[in-house]
Image (cartoon, rainbow, N blue to C red):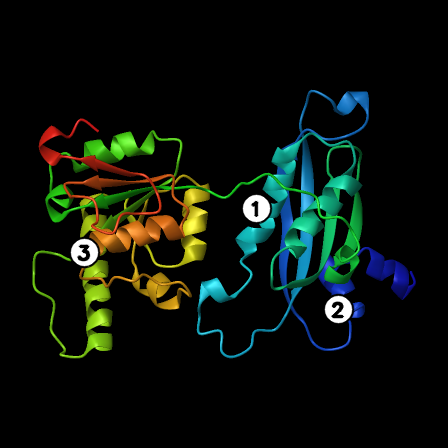
Amino acid sequence: MSSEIRLAFEHPDARADATSPDGPLDRISLRDHIVEVEIGAFQLERGKTQRICFNVVVEVRPLTGAVDDDVDRILSYDRVTEAIAAELAEERLNLLETLADRIAERILAEPQAVRTFVRIEKLDRGPGALGVEIVRSVADLATKPVAAHADRTPHPHVVYLTNAAIWSPNLARWLDQLEQRAEPVILCVGRADVAAPQTGHKMTQRRVDLLAIEQNAWVLAGRDDRCVVVDTKTELDWAMKNGRISVWAPSKIVLDAVDGPAVGPDKPVSLAAWFAGHMEASDLLLIGEEPPAGGADVPVLVLDIAQSGL
């Protein structure tokens, strides 16, 4: 078998390596990702699902500077699987070619992506795998009209809990009812009822106060296993798309934000209001607390703990 033919049937990662453009590019890959879906142009493929296997390689721009073990600086594998899921949910398709092209286009919309190989195979249409493979680059899309994708950005329900709410015997019941909402839920807290260490320096005090909020987030996590402490945008996105309750640990997002909050961690309700706007939340629910003096960019709801019917 010639090297060209052998290469044609290798994993897309080998194809990417053999056809790499000038200059080194990093790659991430997805191998043997199998989904059951209804797809196909033939009548016998309608009304039933079949197994589809995805193998994807994405070439990305090398990072400038150190990675610093920071998940928000890289193109997450989840973005690849989410691109697949989003296109499968968009509409029923007849052709694998159409599906592959749309997945590639969605992946290449990511800022880090340069080129992608998408291989899709039907596993149940015969004794072997039947499929297609395409390669697309950012340059290929430059002259192609960009299709409008449906807005699938989660708009979370942000909930601020006072310390009284954290320790309330009603906490589990509140979480039960919050889980029933259509929107994903992100919980915010302030500092515990213990004075934080004082540094006498504005910037270092800000760090200490943010860490004090995070300590209290872990206290809440200890009250109920559904409360998972999260500090990166990538993890928050994953939790929202998978119906998990998150507790916001604010340090990283606050310190990394270009349009950071005008208030400090000493005003935790106002900080939660900023976070709700930053996350494009559907609303902000305050349990046991008054609305922030400066208002919020999202609707604010208030629940009195003494009347906590939720």
Q: Is residue 268 visible?
A: yes
Give the distance between the C-alpha atoms of the residues marked 1 and 2, in whole angstroms: 25 Å
Q: Nearer the viewer, residue 299 or 224?
A: 299
Q: Earlier in the sequence, mark 1 or mark 2?
A: 2
Q: Is residue 4 left or right of 251 when viewed as pictured?
A: right
Dot 3, how many residues are within 10 Å of its Cα: few (below 14), some (14-19), or many (20+)? many
> Is 212 displayed left or right of 20 in the figure?
left
In depth, the one of 90 and 282 nearer the eye is 282
Task: Say which amino acid is labelled 2.
Answer: Asp
Mark in the foreground, 1 or 2: 1
Q: Amino acid at mark 1?
A: Glu
Residue at the disc numbered 2: 17
Secondary structure beneath label 2:
helix
Residue 254 rendering spot, x and y as whole percentages: 34, 63
Residue drawn at x 66%, y 60% as measured from the top left: 58
Tell which residue pokes out farthest to the right in this image: 2
**Residue bearing the label numbered 1:** 82
